[in-house]
Amino acid sequence: MKQEEAGSRPSSESGSPVYILAIETSCDETSVAIVRDGTDILANVVSSQVETHRLYGGVVPEVASRQHVEMITLIIEEAFAKANVRPDQLSAVAVTHGPGLIGALLVGVVAAKTLACALELPLIGVHHIAGHIYANELVHAIQYPCMSLVVSGGHTELVHVESEGVFRIIGQTRDDAAGEAYDKVARALKLPYPGGPHIDRLAHEAEEAVPLPRAWLEPDSYDFSFSGLKSAVLAALNTAAMKGQPLAPEAVARGFQDSVIEVLVEKALRAVKEYGAKQLLLAGGVAANKGLRAALEARCAQAGVPLLAPPLALCTDNAAMIAAAAFLKYRRGEFSPMDLKAEPLLQLEAWSVS
Ligand code: KG4
Ligand code: ZN
């Protein structure tokens, strides 16, 4: 991917290629990638636990940790084989060390430290959301300052990226993350976990939309709120069921998706304008949403704002995005100590490059 552009970027001081092995285990995907010079994906192996967690309707942290333990060594071996890279060719080992589930993060952190120690390589701890944002760099050249709309299962944030690797959160959810709201509404509609893609599909099949509120909050706020919308969906479903006139799931999905998208798009575009951003970057699992991508594309085209969005496979959790973010720190020689901790509440702004 993006081989021609990758070649034009600075790699190491010696000019020889930089191979970063990255590990991602913050939630329910075990992923290992090997990326050359920050953007050239040689391997990006993702083992999803979604089938297991579907039985419980959501991620069970203890089960997630155990499956990461079972998979991590196999996935590392698979990544080396796919990339056709030898351990002695690596330049650094990167790992998501937060935010996320503590037990799940620990598996990746211990694996990364072990590799770094055994191979005598620098270790780079990466913030998961920095990874989602820099997934864009794997396919497009980012220009600064830019604005990133981060929408995932655990986060909904507007992040101002003033310069490379320097983050400032200007707005975030006050309750549920967008993906979390999708999953909860999907559950109410008896759809399988994770619900986002199912709601997206149903919304496109709908002929009408159940009217639902928009949470704009204070006029100048860039914050979001989705729990009121989720409660409104549940109330509409209950009321209709009590009247003996159940709502069509497609119409509920469409009403919910319309409300989420309208607020995300309006706030993102307002932020781009206010902060003079050169690009809008879409990031996180909900960035796979077809309705959101279409609405953003239309509004950005109208406003003359370049929109960057990773391909679907790089929107959801994967380790290539962690390698892309790690490369920022690699080039600056900003390495992590060997006592790097898993930090479930790691802050994005604090992870910024120096
Ligand atoms: O970024 P991600 O893979 O994991 C976290 O870091 O949270 O995001 C997972 C979330 C889930 O809530 C899932 O329902 C949502 O992304 N998602 C979608 C779509 N595909 C995945 N939400 C809406 N529409 C989609 N097409
Ligand atoms: Zn994620």
Image (spheres, helix red, strand yellow):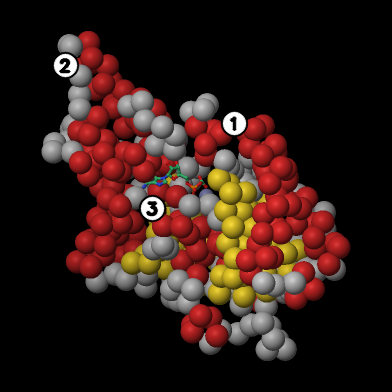
Residue at horizontal 44%, vertical 34%? 193
| Alpha carbons under labels 2 and 1: distance apart | 35 Å
Near-viewer residue (175 or 34): 34
Q: Is residue 212 above or below residue 43?
A: above
Q: Position of residue 120 (x, y in %)?
A: 85, 68
From the viewer's side, name the closer residue of 311 and 338. 311
Residue drawn where x is 24% and y is 29% of the image: 249
Q: Is mark 1 within 8 Å of ligand 1?
A: no
Residue 296 screen position, x and y as percent: 28, 58
Q: Which mark is residue 354?
A: none
Q: Secondary structure at mark 3?
A: helix
Q: Are marks 3 and 1 in contact (CB under 8 Å)?
A: no
Disc 2 on helix, strand or loop? loop
Mark seen at residue 245: 2
Q: Which mark is residue 60?
A: 1
Based on the displayed image, in which of its 4 quarters is residue 242 positioned? top left
- Amino acid at dot 3: Ala
Lower position in the chain sequence, tag 2 or tag 1: 1
31 relative to 253 in the view: left or right: right
Tell me the kind of residue under disc 1.
Val
* Count of all numbered marks drawn on residues in the image: 3
Residue at 20% in and 19% down: 246
Other-residue count near label 3 (Cα within 10 Å), few / some / many at <14 / 14–19 / ≥20: many
**Residue 184 x, y percent position in the rendering:** 40, 30
Quarter of the image for residue 271 reads: bottom left
| Disc 1 crowd, CA 10 A, few/some/many (<14, 14-19, 20+) | some
Indicate if the residue with disc 3 has its beta carbon within 8 Å of ligand 1. Answer: yes
> Tag 3 or tag 2, which sits nearer the N-term?
2
Q: Which mark is residue 288?
A: 3
Q: What is the secondary structure assignment of the residue under circle 1?
A: loop
Instruction: Quote the CA–CA distance across marks 3 and 1.
Output: 23 Å
- In the image, 121: left or right of 343? right
